[in-house]
Structures are given as C-alpha cells and as structure tokens.
Amino acid sequence: MTQPQTNTIKPGKLVIKRTIPATADELFDAWLDADSLSQWMLPGDHRRNTVTVDARVGGAYEIIMHHQDGDKRHYGEYRGIERNKKLVFTWHSDATRHTETLVTVEFIAASDSTEIVLTHERLPDHDSAQGHTRGWTRGLELLEAHLKH
C-alpha cells in the first residue's frame, strides 16, 4: 500500500517524499530510461513527451512535453548517479525562468517498497516552487501507476 506523500516548501526549495511499492532497481531505472520517462513524466495537461537521455555523469537529458498550447522543454545535465541510491541533475524549464535549478532524487529501499525523497533547490520564487511541487507530486503518482502495469 502506498504511504501518504509529504511535501515541504521553503524559499527556493521543495522536498517531496513518497513511498512506492516497487524496488529501488525498478524506480531508479524508470528515471534513466527515455521510454519510461516519456510514459510517466506527464504531470500537466499533455499526453505525450519526446525524451532523450544520456545516463552518465555529465550526460544531458531533454524532456519535451507536448501541450495543446505549444511544446514545453525541460532539460539539464546529470551531476551524480549512484545506482539505486541517488540521482542529481540540473533542471531548466519555463517554470524555472530557464535558470539552473538542482534536483536530487534519493531511493531508500525498504522490505517491499522504496521511499523516494525528491529535493528541488535553487527555485527562483514561491510560484515556481508551488508549480514544481504540483508537477513532481503528479509525476510520482504517475510513476507508481506506470510500474504497476
């Protein structure tokens, strides 16, 4: 059973915690596979993404979310990859005013589930933090649903 999600917003930073009934392997791989990302990284009103991933430290990723009112580009670089433990990457988008923000995703394995702790830092303002909280929350819900299939 999925544990309740907790969200914290502080100036320039948000933290989202969610426990998902999946292994750290499954969750970690879902973040670094372009096909998987294209299926669950759909937090808004769109239904399709174009995703490229170069899953190595220094490698880039790009997620283009196709909306009715136009495409939204999200992109960045992997700064740290610790298999089944942690991902660290930069995140640029319209919602960050194209400034460099930093996302850390930690995977904490339990017996039959994994807690994801997602920290998004360097956000330009409160509106950006609130929008990203909604987006990441929905994204993690969709990730859980994706892994159940």
Image (cartoon, rainbow, N blue to C red):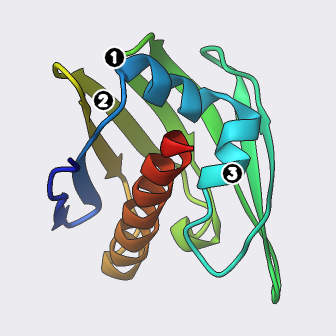
Residue 141 location (% of width, % of height): 41, 58
C-alpha distance separating marks 1 and 2:
6 Å
Residue at image coords 68%, 51%? 39
Residue nearer the viewer, 32 or 127: 32
Residue nearer the viewer, 78 or 49: 49
Is 98 rendered above or below residue 112?
A: below
Badge 1: residue crowd in 10 Å (few <14, some 14–19, many ≥20): some
Return the residue at label 3: 39
Q: Quadrant of residue 105?
A: top left
For the residue labelled by badge 1, is the local secondary structure a helix, a strand or a loop? loop
Between circles 1 and 3, the one closer to the viewer is: 3
Residue 8 location (% of width, % of height): 15, 62
Q: Given the image, on which type of amino acid does mark 2 rest?
A: Glu
Q: Given the image, on which type of amino acid does mark 3 rest?
A: Gln
For residue 30, side relative to residue 39 (left or right): left
Residue at image coords 37%, 54%? 122
C-alpha distance separating marks 3 and 2:
21 Å
> Sequence-wise, which precedes: disc 1 or disc 3?
3
Residue at image coords 39%, 73%? 134
Mark on residue 85?
A: 1
Residue 23 location (% of width, % of height): 36, 22
For the residue labelled by badge 2, is the local secondary structure a helix, a strand or a loop? strand
Return the residue at label 2: 106
